[in-house]
Image (cartoon, rainbow, N blue to C red):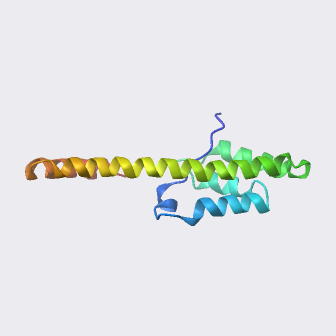
């Protein structure tokens, strides 16, 4: 099992300045591990991020030693940062594709748009 910080799914962070990553950070500050647990369920993908859920449980269990609290706050900051980076990268990719569409002939662009719509989830 790999201990990686989850990237929140696009449906929870589509809007600029989305509140979900910030809510996870606030939950981690108030009750260590709760935001990390929530992030495990809102993970970008078709599965639950069990590593994040395990980390959230350990953060909660070790909060009385203050280790869990510091770890939880750090993890919440990382979730916010990683989610923001991922979605900025996706926006750059989308702009690149749109720029390429502008340079194509109408026939090429319609074929390309049909192919990208079939590939999008």
Measuring from the top left, give residue 20's x and y in whole percent: 59, 63
Q: Percent x, y for residue 4?
A: 63, 39
Residue at the spot 86% in from the left edge and 51% down from the top edge: 63
Q: Residue at x 63, y 54 (%)?
A: 39
Q: Is residue 38 above or below residue 74?
A: below
Residue pushed farthest top?
1
**Screen quadrant of the N terminus:** top right
Q: Quadrant of residue 34?
A: bottom right
18 left or right, relative to 108: right
> Residue 59 vs residue 88: left or right?
right
**6 on left or right of 120:** right
Q: Nearer the viewer, residue 45 or 31?
A: 31
Where on the picture, by quarter, is residue 29?
A: bottom right
Q: Residue 45: in sight, yes or no?
A: no
Query: Where is residue 28 shown, x and y percent of the image?
Result: 74, 57
| Visible residue check, residue 81 | yes
Q: Position of residue 114 (x, y in %)?
A: 20, 51
- Relative placement, left or right, of 110 versus 97 is left
């Amino acid at each position: 099992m790999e201990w990686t910080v989850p990237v929140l799914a696009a449906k929870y962070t589509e809007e600029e300045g989305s509140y979900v990553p910030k809510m996870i950070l606030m939950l981690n500050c108030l009750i260590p591990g709760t935001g990390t647990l929530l992030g495990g369920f809102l993970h970008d993908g078709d599965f639950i991020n069990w590593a994040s859920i395990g980390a959230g449980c350990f953060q909660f269990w070790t909060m009385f030693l203050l280790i869990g609290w510091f770890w939880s706050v750090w993890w919440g900051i990382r979730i916010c940062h990683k989610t923001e980076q991922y979605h900025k990268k996706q926006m750059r990719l989308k702009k690149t594709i749109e720029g390429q569409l502008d340079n194509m002939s109408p026939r090429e662009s319609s074929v390309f748009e049909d192919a990208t719509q079939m590939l999008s989830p």
